Image: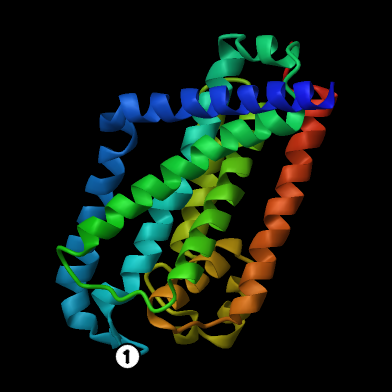
Amino acid sequence: MKQSNLSVQWISFTTILRKEVNRFLRIWGQTILPAVINQSLYFLIFGAFIGSQVGEIQGVSYMGFIIPGLIMMSIIRNSFNNVVSSFFGAKFQRQIEELLVSPTSSLVLICGYTSGGILRGLIVGSVVYLVSMVFESPTIEHPFIVLLFGILTATVFSLGGFINAVFAKNFDDISIFLNFVLTPLTYLGGVFYSISMLPEQFQTLSKFNPILYMVDGFRYGFYGIADLNIEMSIAVLATLVLLLGVICWILLEKGLGMRS
């Protein structure tokens, strides 16, 4: 009986994941291409045009310095967008009710949707990295750190997208957090600058922005330079994954936002 239940859960997980991957790959012109074009414009404007006037930051050319941050930006936005749009779409079309009454556990439901978001974030991030090589040849000193921060960040924002979708009442609600919270935090998260360039009070304030730990740790994986302690950054991301995962599970178990 136990083995049978595990088999059912595995089938549920792979089905949800396959549906998610097929969805964003089928409409790649809307899910992958725009992110690549947007980041290419950042490379061109901030890296090539403005970067030539800035010079180096911490011994790295400005173009090279912003590449990890721009890759991380694409991972953040795409992992979040994939889950929030897909799960809210399932709610809006009342498809989610079929899953809720099925033997699929809350944990499997969360893992299925968030895994789709993680894969989209990492795929888009990888494509953006390949595009960046047109402008610069970024080195990767610590590949494991790069992969670890990429996965942890994609997981955090996939779970965040899930929570956003649960509380969203209409399609406008799924963009509120992205436009008014996530976008400002991303631009203030050290993508385009080192916090060591800021006055001390703003450095302290910046440390309350979780995206700073993601970008800084990711950049450390590329060049071995960091403004923050790398172990602390990993701990912050792991804590966020655990906290958001528990919140997602509680929301599903209680059925909040699932039933009208």
The amino acid type, in three-letter code, at marker 1 is Gly
* Residue count near mark 1 (Cα–Cα under 10 Å), binned few <14, some 14–19, many ≥20: few
Q: Picture coordinates of residue 256 (x, y %)?
A: 78, 24
46 lies left or right of 242: left
* Vertical relation: 132 (above or below) 207: above
231 lies left or right of 115: right
Which quadrant is the C terminus positioned in?
Answer: top right
Q: Picture coordinates of residue 193 (x, y %)?
A: 40, 75
59 lies left or right of 109: left
* Vertical relation: 247 (above or below) 12: below
Q: Nearer the viewer, residue 123 or 66?
A: 123
Which quadrant is the N terminus positioned in?
Answer: top right
- The part of the image, by quadrant, that contains residue 107 is top right
Q: Give the total of numbered labels.
A: 1
The residue drawn where x is 72% and y is 18% is 258
Q: Which of 162 and 44 is in front in this view?
A: 162
Check disc 1 and report its element: helix, strand or loop.
loop
Q: Picture coordinates of residue 74 (x, y %)?
A: 39, 51
Camera sees residue 47? yes
Residue to which mark 1 is pinned: 59
Residue at the limit of the structure toward the bottom, as seen here: 59
